[in-house]
Image (cartoon, grey):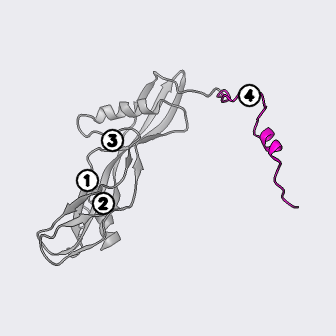
């Protein structure tokens, strides 16, 4: 079979051009909107850590040398709702964020995390150093009831205060003592 392009007239007809001169956009088809004003119930938050950036190894042979921090992005995360149902996502997210506002605020809805840029450091010592950045994740299941139906999903977020650390590859690994040590362990495995 030989492929032949369609004539322009046929393409115009296939594109829905009627020649009537009316070039307004077609009316949008009705879609189901999210039911507002419902009741949200949150489950127990699952908290963890996520390593988001690691620098290459910087070998310091002289003390107090200023070095720029250039993170390689390891992971990224978006503050969002994960559900298959149509729900007022931003409203539900804000309800959860309000419960954390006084102790450990969450990032704003829709925020995408990337490692920081433009930082620098110096060390009062010599060795092979690695900087790493991580976030404290908060994943919270929810049930949203509105209009006689219930939708389930998960709020995906993290605490607004970013965290970072530095390790010396020449020092022995002490092993993780709690979940907060997990990012350092992963950074050490990747670079040392």
Where is residue 168, by image quadrant? bottom left
Q: Pointer 2: what residue? A: 183
CA–CA distance between discs 1 and 3? 14 Å
Q: Residue at x 43, y 41 (%)?
A: 80
Q: Residue at x 25, y 40 (%)?
A: 104
Q: Pointer 1: what residue? A: 163
The reply, left or right, for residue 99 in relation to residue 3 is left
CA–CA distance between discs 2 and 4? 62 Å
Which of discs 2 and 4 lies nearer the camera? The answer is 4
Q: Which mark is residue 177?
A: none
Q: Which mark is residue 21?
A: 4
Mark 1 or 3, nearer chain start: 3
The answer to the question of whether label 1 and label 3 lie on touching residues, with beta carbons closer than 8 A, is: no
Q: Point out the stretch of residues depicted in magenta.
A: 1-29
CA–CA distance between discs 2 and 3? 20 Å
| Label 1 secondary element | strand
| Label 4 secondary element | loop
| Label 2 secondary element | helix
Q: Pointer 3: what residue? A: 107
Relative to the observer, which residue lies in front, 186 or 24?
24
């Amino acid at each position: 079979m030989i492929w032949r392009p369609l004539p322009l007239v046929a393409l115009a007809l296939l594109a829905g051009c009627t020649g009537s001169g009316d070039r307004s956009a077609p009316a949008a088809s009705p879609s189901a909107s999210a039911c507002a004003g419902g009741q949200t119930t949150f489950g127990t938050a699952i908290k963890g850590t996520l390593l988001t950036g690691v620098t290459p190894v910087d070998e310091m042979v002289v003390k107090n040398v200023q070095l720029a921090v250039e993170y390689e992005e390891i992971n990224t995360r978006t503050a969002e709702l994960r559900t298959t149902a149509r729900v007022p996502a931003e409203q539900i997210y804000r309800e959860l964020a309000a419960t954390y506002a006084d102790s450990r605020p969450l990032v704003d809805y829709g925020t995408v995390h990337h490692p920081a840029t433009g930082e620098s450091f110096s060390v009062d010592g010599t060795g092979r150093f690695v900087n790493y950045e991580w976030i404290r994740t908060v994943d919270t299941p929810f049930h949203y009831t509105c209009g006689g139906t219930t939708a389930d999903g998960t709020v995906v977020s993290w605490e607004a205060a970013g965290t970072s650390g530095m390790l010396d590859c020449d020092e022995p690994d002490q092993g993780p003592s709690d979940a907060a040590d997990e990012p350092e362990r992963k950074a050490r495995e990747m670079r040392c």
